[in-house]
Amino acid sequence: MKHLGENEMESILIVDDEEEIVELLDFYMGNSGYKTFKAYNGKEAMEIFQKENISIIILDVMLPGLNGKEVLRRIRQKSSIPILFLSAKGEDMDKIDGLFLGADDYMSKPFNPMEVVARVKALLRRSSIFNNNDEVNCITTIGDLNLDEKICRVYKNNIDMELTAFEYKLLAFLMKNKNRVFTKAQLFEQVWEKDYLGDESIIMVYISKIREKIEDNPKKPKFIKTIKGLGYVLEEN
């Protein structure tokens, strides 16, 4: 993510093919002090993203031409910018696909625009902490994993694992609390900093993504273990 100048306001790219939704979010985000950019298809979204200094993206799944999942995939090849995924109510596979592709959070339509504002503020706050964590100076080592909190990175055999902000936060929490079992609810509330509403998919997806990056064999993990009926634990071998 590009860093903002001292007097530069944070900017939001709103992407949806429904004009009423774009205008509604534009109104609420503008009233909350954000600069907004609007796109109605994937091609427009990519053009704006490449040209402007965007702080966060609100991205709909169902877009004409270049759909939301493909836009997300392309952006994740270049940037860890926070992305809030929008999907139709009940489309669980869209949510899960979005998380696997690198979305940071999701909301179902119809939504309360004030909740969208709250989610955006939370994502930007966490992203700011992730990118500007200069006061921490702590190395945690577990096996061949090294957590460097000063620069918010995790290395395996000195190779950067290239984690997203939420992958890093979840893994860092587990590493700093090694050998302790946490329920999905506890992990959700710790990492996403909001009440757990019983949606297990977001934790399961992120654990799976982290295992793909840090485990030699993700199907037989040696670090993050599943404790059936309880939750997860990161064990020191």
Image (cartoon, grey):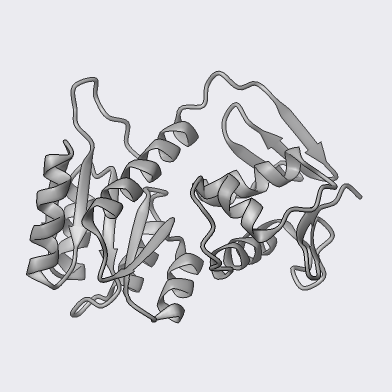
Quarter of the image for residue 60 reads bottom left
Identity of the residue furthest to the right in this view:
237
In the image, taking residue 211 as reference, residue 79 lies left or right, namely left
Q: Residue at x 51, y 45 (%)?
A: 193
**Residue at point 42% right, 49% down?**
80
Residue 231 visible: yes
- 43 or 115: nearer the viewer: 115
**Residue 65 image-quadrant placement:** bottom left
At 51% from the left and 62% from the top, the residue drawn is 197
Q: Quadrant of the N terminus?
A: top left
Residue 73 position within the rendered picture, expressed as x and y whole percent measured from the top left: 39, 66
For residue 233, what is the image quadrant? bottom right
Q: Is residue 43 above or below residue 164?
A: below
Which residue is painted at 54% across and 57% down in the image?
196
Position of residue 86 relative to residue 115, above or below, is: below
From the viewer's side, name the closer residue of 217 and 140. 140
The count of marks equals: 0
Position of 82 with respect to 143 (left or right) is: left
Q: Taking the image as drawn, is residue 162 in sight?
A: no
Position of residue 231 in the picture relative to residue 20 (left or right): right
Q: Which percent across, then down, holds residue 5?
A: 24, 24
**Residue 146, position as x, y percentages in the image:** 74, 39
Locate residue 191, reporting x and y percent.
56, 47
Q: Nearer the viewer, residue 80 or 105?
A: 105
